[in-house]
């Protein structure tokens, strides 16, 4: 399935998941897709493995939780974030660390205060390696953190290999 990227979401400076200057982090990039899903991509390093050559299960949970929680920004202002209330995942297949990892997430229901989402880590052959679902509280970022979200701590960074479209299995 061929999908256009409608927008790239911002990265932070030091967040473990999306921080571009965090030497231990995932340095994930987040892309809003034309079908209403949010896609995250990152390339794990050796420091991100649990069993040799496999992404640590806790990091699979981390990237899924972040991607589902960010999906609310597709339909609300960038100032509304998801704060995790409940999260569960199912590990189906190991996630290799020798290439780019793709994560897809979407909102499945919402009301005034909460939303529920689901997502999965997709292997290059199209199979689901890890699936997750969660419930999140909608919260204004100013109530979560006092970081400079108008300055260098949070910005949309253009990279040479940014995606403009994706081919999903």
Image (cartoon, grey):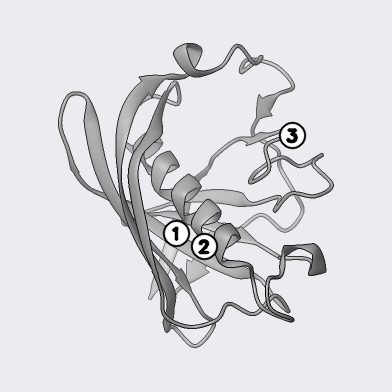
For label 3, the crowd category at 10 Å Cα-Cα, with few meaning under 14, some 14 to 19 and many 20 or more, is some
Placement of 115 over or under 151, stated as above or below: below
Count residues near mark 2 (Cα–Cα under 10 Å), then give few for <14, some for 14-19, many for 20+: some
Residue under circle 1? 4
Mark 1 and mark 2 residues within 8 Å of each other at the beta carbon: yes
Relative vertical location of residue 130 with respect to residue 127 in this rendering, above or below = above
Residue 169 visible in rendering: no
From the top left corner, tell me how far across and down residue 109 is, in percent: 17, 44
Under circle 2, the secondary element is: strand
Q: Which mark is residue 14?
A: 3
Q: Tell me: 137 left or right of 29.
A: left
Quarter-of-image position of residue 88: bottom left
Q: Nearer the viewer, residue 128 or 49?
A: 49
The residue under the point 60% across, 35% down is 10
Q: Nearer the viewer, mark 1 or mark 3?
A: 3
Q: Which mark is residue 165?
A: 2
Q: Locate the N terminus by quadrant.
A: bottom left
Report the residue at 64% width, 80% height from top. 96
């Amino acid at each position: 399935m061929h999908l256009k990227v409608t927008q790239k979401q911002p990265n932070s400076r030091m967040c473990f998941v999306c921080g571009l200057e965090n030497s231990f982090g995932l340095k994930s990039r987040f892309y809003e897709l034309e079908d209403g899903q949010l896609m995250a991509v990152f390339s794990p390093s050796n420091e991100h493995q649990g069993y040799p050559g496999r992404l640590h299960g806790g990091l699979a949970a981390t990237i899924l939780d972040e991607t589902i929680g960010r999906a609310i920004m597709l339909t609300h202002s960038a100032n509304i974030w998801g704060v995790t209330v409940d999260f569960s995942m199912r590990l189906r297949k190991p996630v290799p660390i020798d290439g780019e990892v793709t994560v897809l997430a979407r909102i499945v229901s919402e009301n005034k205060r909460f939303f529920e989402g689901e997502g999965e880590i997709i292997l290059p052959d199209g199979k689901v390696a890890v699936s997750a679902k969660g419930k999140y509280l909608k919260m204004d970022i100013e109530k979560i953190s006092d970081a400079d979200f108008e300055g260098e701590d949070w910005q949309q960074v253009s990279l040479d290999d940014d995606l403009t479209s994706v081919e999903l299995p």
